[in-house]
């Protein structure tokens, strides 16, 4: 799909050389040929439209350099714990697996504001996609040119220039199976010609609507596949599951008369005389204790909350951009540009899981008590237990029933986020003597607010309704809650309450000057240089209602974040940079760049970059680079407050005495269940991350119809900023993380510290391939294009004094980038007259699957497969231009309607149950029609 900047055929090179000099992403020096020492991918507007791509997110999903991370609207749809706030409708750009916060996103070569809530990544939904002329992707680190955030690479969205006329575009992308439809419309208009009128003004407006896609609209979203090793790890069911607790109905558990094992989670439907879990409510089924290594839960039921969840968020977007350019004399231009967007997303989740306690305080919910109104239900539950387990000391009639319940009457939980972003830019470009200059002053801001949009309730009222038994957690399908229960929930509804809001602002003055130094070495071309400066002020604030400081005592289960409120913070950044392009010989060009950044609170960082291009003959060129990079911690990582959230699981024991920390009441050292507080938060002592980057490659163009490029690259990051170490990793490697387990005077674990620290690093390397073959066929022209990415190495280390892990390529990664070894895009296009056809194959390689605890311990389901299959989809498009001023493109995405490959990945590790949202598009086959009319 993408065209390599340095792989043009001879004819195209000659055409390029007739153009004005231009600046290519990755360099400040203008040149007449886009061919450079750095690997740059350029995607033109026509190529984007031919693929039926309607957004920056869809474009990134098809680029093989983009990583398989949780950066899309499908992969980040989970509920965010306090302190993270998730992405709330954000789509991020993540190159080479370095993270969306280490990939720099530019609009017309300059920064835009990071998202108001996240405060660290640019939301691609704010980019005015309708006005984009091309996208340039620098597949190399660029801290020496652009400063922080450019470790993974740079994506530069470049809009049209000097546009005259009026065009109207409308499009629809409709799925065959329903849900997840996309509709868009845009208007682009411009007046004035820079060459004749000496001015040009143009503007574009785009509206877009992404409709919701629910899990129950896709058959592959099914967590009840125990024969393959997948089963829901949730005991919160529409007909409640009874759990243990001191002073509760079943105390520390009941002895199973058949096995003599202690049962700690029991649903009466799953007892031998019960009605069966499947009859307890929609999407209920038996809990698989073997898969989850929880023998105490063999009589529990589970609920498919993966299928109940939304798997693509609904998003509505309004984007606009305008630019006015005025020619001053023959060599200078003044321009003003404004970009604005409004993005509204609604994240819809499954209904609340209610967990109750004995003697619950203000932040917890009460167990089911025996009273006159609850006696019939209470007795039914008690008698079911008595009939199977028989009289036992732990079975105490009259004691409250502690349970886990899926409150379907509460409705789905919903968070609505509205983000408003803008950038105002004024600038001058021109030539003074033999030197070019570019000066700009900009202010960019993203302001975002999240509100509760349904499914959340004020805790005191909800607590009262549960304690009195007004809400009944033990109802079968067809048995409805009382009108009093509905009235109580209506009175407790917290819909409309602000959750939090944030503002991220960047004000920048930049200036660069480039030109010839007036001398040559042994080449026909002059030595050229660029110098410049950046002055930047970054601001961030995060706030919300003070009432959220009460946490669960205020609104139950809502992801409030009061401990992380930040009063307005700011820092100033000053930077100087220089770049030299040295043609040593006609065949050898060397580029040297260096940048010095000075940050408030961190001091300075100097980062060089060295690159070369050697072209011994016309048809082959070698290139390579070496650079250092850095990334400063964002405001949130530095200044977040400390959050303490009680661990909600029922599967944790002290890992110092219990192997892997897995609770089991029948194992001596694992029989004490613990639920400590998980501590997260910021660290004002964080230091910048550092990186080293290398690349070397070659370009072959033996004829005007064939070109091939191959580039090897490596990125090593040091002093990385980490938090939220996987709890299973911490318990399985207790000796390494012992200091993170905080104990009281009696030696009991009361906290697990998961705050941000600088530690460890990553080592990543790979090879990128791009090839084109062109020719003539049946009176038309054809082009075959292959773009592939081979990930050779991915290693990590959690602490500086530890060696790197073994190679993790092809292994399952729980939360971040999935290190797939090979992925490619292969396309064949044929153009003749008014018709243009394109067929594209998109391939993502397989990998080793996640293993649930039971399988780790040796349990093997009958149809278990430890490897996730590869994922291959085909897209077809045809464009027609027979009618003057009209262009119509019809595309079928996922031509064969291929489902995502099956995986054991489950929601507790991210989003998607039975499928992987970081790899696959859940929409399935869709039909895309895009019509553009130019007046």
Image: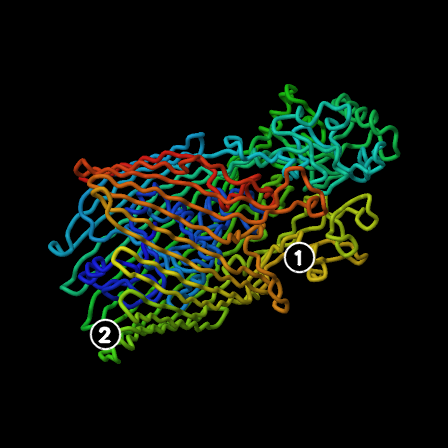
C-alpha span from label 2 to label 1: 59 Å
Above or below: residue 612 compared with residue 806: below
Does dot 1 land on a helix, a strand or a loop? strand
In the current view of this chain or complex, which residue is farthest to the left?
Answer: 196
Query: Residue 187's quadrant in the figure?
Result: top left
Q: Residue at x 32, y 57 (%)?
A: 4
Q: Which mark is residue 525?
A: 2
Asked which colour scheme the image uses, the reply is: rainbow
Residue placed under numbered mark 1 in the picture:
753
Q: Residue at x 65, y 54 (%)?
A: 679
Q: Say left or right for 557 vs 897.
A: right
Q: Say left or right for 473 vs 532.
A: right
Evaluate whether residue 494 shows in this view.
no
Residue 780: x, y in percent? 22, 44
Q: Say left or right for 310 vs 857.
A: left
Q: Residue at x 64, y 46 (%)?
A: 851
Indicate which label's residue lies in the foreground, 2 or 1: 2
The residue lying toward the viewer, choosing from 40 and 593, is: 40
Q: Residues within 10 Å of mark 2 (few under 14, many from 20)?
A: some
């Amino acid at each position: 799909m993408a065209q390599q900047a340095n792989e043009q055929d001879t004819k195209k090179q000659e055409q390029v050389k007739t153009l004005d000099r231009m600046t290519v992403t990755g360099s400040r020096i203008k040149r007449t040929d886009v061919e450079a020492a750095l690997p740059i991918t350029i995607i033109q507007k026509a190529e984007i439209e031919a693929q039926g791509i309607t957004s920056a997110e869809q474009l990134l999903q098809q680029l093989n350099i983009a990583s398989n991370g949780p950066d899309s609207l499908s992969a980040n749809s989970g509920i965010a714990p306090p302190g993270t706030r998730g992405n709330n409708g954000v789509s991020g750009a993540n190159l080479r697996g370095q993270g969306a916060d280490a990939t720099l996103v530019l609009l017309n070569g300059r920064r835009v504001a990071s998202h108001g809530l996240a405060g660290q990544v640019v939301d691609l939904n704010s980019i005015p996609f309708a006005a984009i002329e091309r996208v340039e992707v620098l597949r190399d680190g660029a801290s020496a040119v652009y400063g922080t955030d450019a470790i993974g690479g740079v994506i530069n969205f470049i809009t049209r220039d000097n546009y005259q006329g009026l065009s109207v575009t409308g499009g629809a992308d409709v799925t065959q199976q329903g849900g997840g439809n996309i509709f868009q419309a845009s208007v682009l208009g411009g007046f004035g010609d820079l060459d004749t009128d000496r001015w040009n003004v143009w503007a574009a407006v785009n509206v877009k609507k992404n409709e919701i896609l629910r899990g129950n609209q896709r058959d592959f979203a099914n967590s009840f596949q125990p024969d393959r090793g997948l089963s829901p790890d949730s005991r919160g069911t529409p007909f409640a599951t009874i759990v243990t607790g001191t002073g509760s109905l079943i105390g520390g558990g009941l002895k199973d008369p058949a096995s003599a094992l202690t049962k700690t989670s029991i649903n009466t439907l799953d007892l031998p005389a019960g009605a069966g879990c499947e009859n307890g409510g929609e999407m209920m089924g038996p809990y698989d204790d073997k898969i989850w290594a929880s023998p105490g839960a063999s009589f529990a039921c589970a609920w498919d909350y993966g299928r109940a969840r939304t798997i693509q968020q609904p998003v509505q977007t309004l984007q606009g951009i305008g630019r006015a350019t005025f020619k001053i004399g023959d060599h200078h231009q003044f321009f003003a540009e404004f970009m604005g967007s409004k993005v509204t997303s609604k994240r819809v989740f499954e209904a609340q899981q209610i967990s109750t306690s004995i003697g619950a305080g203000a932040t917890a919910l009460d167990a089911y008590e025996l009273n006159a109104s609850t006696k019939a239900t209470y007795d039914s539950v008690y008698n079911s237990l008595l009939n199977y387990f028989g009289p036992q000391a732990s079975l105490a009639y009259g004691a409250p029933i502690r349970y886990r319940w899926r409150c379907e009457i509460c409705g789905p939980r919903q968070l609505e986020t509205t983000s408003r972003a803008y950038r105002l830019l004024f600038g001058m470009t021109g030539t003074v003597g033999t030197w070019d200059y570019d000066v700009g002053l900009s202010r960019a801001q993203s302001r975002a607010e999240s509100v509760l949009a349904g499914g959340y309730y004020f805790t005191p009222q909800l607590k009262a309704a549960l304690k009195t038994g007004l809400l009944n957690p033990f109802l079968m399908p067809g048995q409805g809650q009382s009108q009093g229960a509905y009235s109580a929930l209506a009175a407790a509804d917290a819909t409309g309450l602000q959750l939090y809001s944030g503002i991220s602002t960047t004000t920048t003055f930049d200036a660069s000057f480039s030109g010839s130094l007036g001398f040559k070495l042994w080449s026909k071309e002059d030595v050229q240089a660029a110098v410049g400066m950046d002055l930047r002020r970054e601001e961030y604030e995060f706030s919300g209602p003070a009432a959220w400081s009460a946490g669960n005592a205020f609104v139950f289960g809502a992801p409030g974040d009061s401990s992380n409120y930040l009063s307005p913070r700011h820092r100033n950044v000053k930077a100087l940079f220089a770049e030299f392009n040295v043609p040593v010989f006609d065949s050898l060009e060397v580029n040297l760049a260096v940048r010095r950044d000075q940050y408030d609170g961190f001091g300075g960082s100097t980062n060089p970059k060295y690159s070369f291009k050697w072209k011994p003959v016309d048809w082959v060129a070698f290139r390579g680079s070496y650079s250092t990079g850095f990334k400063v911690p964002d405001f949130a990582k530095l200044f977040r407050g400390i959050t303490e959230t009680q661990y909600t699981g029922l599967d944790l024991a002290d890992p110092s005495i219990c192997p892997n920390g897995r609770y089991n009441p029948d194992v001596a050292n694992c029989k004490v269940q613990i639920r400590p507080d998980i501590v997260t938060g910021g660290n004002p002592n964080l230091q910048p991350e550092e990186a080293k980057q290398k690349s070397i490659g070659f370009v072959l163009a033996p004829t005007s119809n064939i070109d091939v490029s191959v580039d090897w690259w490596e990125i090593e990051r040091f002093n990385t900023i980490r938090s939220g170490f996987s709890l299973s990793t911490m318990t399985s490697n207790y000796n390494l993380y012992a200091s993170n387990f905080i104990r009281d005077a009696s030696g009991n674990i009361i906290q697990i510290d998961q705050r941000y620290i600088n530690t460890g690093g990553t080592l990543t390397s790979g090879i990128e391939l791009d090839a084109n073959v062109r020719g003539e066929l049946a009176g038309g022209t054809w082009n075959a294009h292959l773009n592939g990415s081979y990930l050779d190495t991915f290693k990590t280390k959690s602490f500086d004094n530890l060696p790197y892990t073994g190679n993790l390529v092809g292994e399952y990664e729980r939360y971040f980038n999935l290190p797939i070894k090979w992925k490619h895009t292969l396309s064949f296009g044929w153009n003749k007259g008014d018709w243009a056809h394109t067929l594209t194959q998109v391939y993502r390689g397989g990998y080793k699957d996640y293993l649930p605890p039971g399988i780790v311990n040796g349990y093997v389901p009958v149809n278990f497969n430890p490897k996730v299959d590869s994922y291959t989809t085909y897209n077809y498009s045809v464009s027609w231009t027979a009618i003057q001023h009209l262009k119509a493109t019809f595309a079928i995405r996922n031509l064969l309607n291929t489902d995502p490959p099956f995986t054991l990945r489950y929601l507790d590790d991210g989003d998607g149950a039975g499928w992987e949202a970081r790899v696959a598009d859940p929409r399935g086959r869709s039909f895309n029609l895009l019509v553009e009319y130019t007046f």
